[in-house]
Image: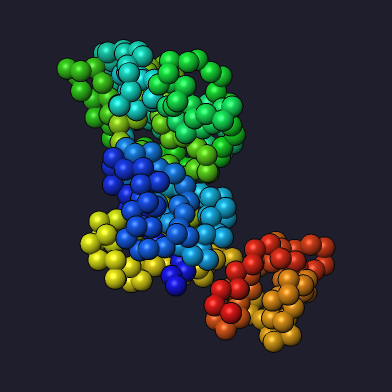
Amino acid sequence: MINGILVIDKDQGMTSADVVYHLRKVLHIKKIGHAGTLDPDVTGVLPIAIGQATKLIELMHQQNKKYVGQGILGFSTDSCDTSGKILSSQKLTQKIAATEIKKAMQEFIGEIEQVPPIYSAVRVNGKHLYEYARAGISVERPKRKVHITNYELEREPFFDDEKGQETFSFQIECSKGTYVRSLVNDLGTKLGVPAVMKTLRRTASSGFDLEQAVKLSTIIEHPEHVTEFIQPLDAFFKDYSHSDLGETDWTKVKNGAAISLKTNAKKVALRYNNSVKAIYQKDGTMYRPYLMLLQNE
């Protein structure tokens, strides 16, 4: 039985659900789920939880994500990316300085309020926003608060004098639920010009990055080698405070009992036999179960 996290480098044109479907089919495992949906046009890191690791999906969602991408200043679309219908265009007569773009980007750092794109998977009254959009039905989009840790210009922007458009490259670190397409669109608003996202690639998610990623095609072609790419459950908890259990406390933990620990950390990864068995959370002077793993016991 496989228990762990498979980091897929998702290709363009495929949904996150497609990746899960193909993996279930080729690995003959039902207990598989992904942490953090990627739009079909977006490539990069898609963590896939397998077996016991599916218990971690909610925790995986809570960690920041990192992206690199490109945006275009000069026009905007209804989907906030280049696949959508053009809503407005403005031919730029001169280049917008990199310093001005950087300054505008810094205004998004911290907690901000976002309105998701109309072409998104956010649900309103049980239906996805994109379903309303395709049906031509107007609907109020719910605002959400997200946190932007980093929003930077990567290199000197390129100005196309003939098209009157400026292309810029960026990198972003943000919380779950952030729509980078909207960030690019909103950056244009700050600069006083329409803007659209051209490309996007996720470079890190749930504590994993492209160095640990493998192409889905590699797994489909050689499913017998999948264990070579599996990240163990413990890898997800590398940044947690750890505590190794003795026999007495291990017996208590197996029964879900509270224990005392010599630490002040809010959450602690409890290890036994060199493997994380549970996550305990501080409750007053004691620590109580937050997430039970107990795999292979």
Q: Quarter holding the C terminus?
A: bottom right
Is residue 236 among what the camera can see?
A: no
Foreground: 195 or 21?
Answer: 21
Quarter of the rendering containing residue 163: top left
**Is 140 left or right of 153, judged from the image as shown?**
right
Q: Which residue lies furthest to the bottom in this view?
A: 247
Q: How many discs mark residues in the rendered view?
A: 0
Q: Which residue is drawn at 55% across and 81% down?
A: 274
Is residue 60 among what the camera can see?
A: yes
Foreground: 40 or 269?
Answer: 40
Foreground: 114 or 58?
Answer: 58
Q: Quarter holding the N terminus?
A: bottom left
Image position of 180 with respect to 3: above or below = above
Q: Which residue is drawn at 42% across and 63% down?
A: 29
Quarter of the rendering containing residue 288: bottom right
Q: Residue furthest left?
A: 162
Colouring used for the render: rainbow
Q: Residue 202: x, y in percent?
A: 37, 46
Q: Which residue is drawn at 72% across and 82% down?
A: 251
Q: Residue at x 38, y 57 (%)?
A: 24
Q: Residue 27: x, y in percent?
A: 35, 63
Q: Residue 113: x, y in percent?
A: 57, 29
Image position of 138 with respect to 35: above or below = above
